[in-house]
Image (spheres, grey):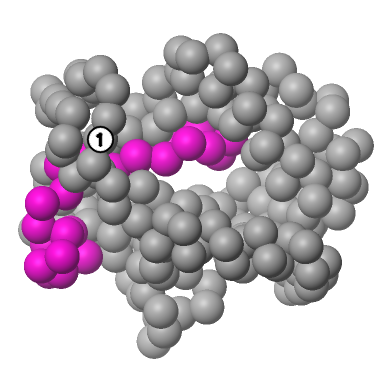
Amino acid sequence: MEHKPHPEPQPLPWHWRLLERWFEHAYRTELLDPDDPSCLFAFNLYPHQGAEVNLQCGGVVRPGDTVLEIHFRREALAPLIATRDPARMGLGLLKLGDRDIPRLALALESDPRLSSVRALHALTLFHRGIHRYGFEVQPVKEWHLARWFTWWHRLVMARDHALGSSRVVPHLDTLVTQHVWVSRDELVRRYGEQGTHRRRSAPRQG
């Protein structure tokens, strides 16, 4: 069966472009692979604040520890979100994850700037199936933050989806922003140069 190519995302209105540029500057985000426009991840580093986070792998994230914050890039996600086929979107997202999670682990091993990273974290709606990569899902305990981030992420999803808000509204019960965490050691153990799961990952095409 022939597969149609993913539709190209529509250009953002000027006010969205300005907001995204401000975000990138304010949080000093950078691409995991600047040479690959399809790269799924951008990231920034920040010192953890707040309570300790105890991870199922045995790791502990303490106040002041360096955390790598993961951001899912619109340029990679929008062509998937713009489709009207949830199964196709899910498959495309898994393929990108299988390709780029090992690249993230290799960056942790090879980039001196990332030598102090204790754990990796994201706030995201896309947490279903994330356990396959060693991440664990935790709720956003502060009710005001949970409502704010969920509202914001739903708005961005409706902005980019071919069906707009009509895609989001029927799924409000499941489209809830959560924390996802994995320790540096756990990700490298799985997907580093000698990782136990590396052989399962799709190699980078170049």
Against 178, residue 102 (above or below) is below
State which quarter of the image contains the N terminus. Answer: bottom right
Horizontal and vertical percent for residue 69?
A: 36, 47
Q: Quadrant of residue 113?
A: bottom left
Q: Nearer the viewer, residue 30 or 95?
A: 30
Q: Residue at x 62, y 61 (%)?
A: 20
Asked whether the viewer can see residue 134, the reply is no
Q: Residue at x 64, y 21 (%)?
A: 147
Which amino acid type is shown beneath numbered disc 1? His
What element does badge 1 sit on?
loop
Q: How many labels were placed on the picture?
A: 1
Q: Is residue 65 magenta?
A: no
Q: Nearer the viewer, residue 67 or 22?
A: 22
* 52 displayed left or right of 92: left
Against 34, residue 173 (above or below) is above
Asked whether the viewer can see residue 87, the reply is yes
Against 14, residue 86 (above or below) is above
Q: Which residue is mark 1?
A: 48
What is the magenta range? Answer: 106-133
State which quarter of the image contains the C terminus. Answer: bottom left
Q: Nearer the viewer, residue 20 or 82?
A: 20
Horizontal and vertical percent for residue 96?
A: 48, 60
Q: Is residue 123 magenta?
A: yes
* 167 displayed left or right of 179: right
Horizontal and vertical percent for residue 164?
A: 87, 46
Q: Quadrant of residue 180?
A: top left
Q: Residue at x 48, y 36 (%)?
A: 123
Q: Nearer the viewer, residue 137 or 196?
A: 137
Q: Quadrant of residue 36?
A: bottom left
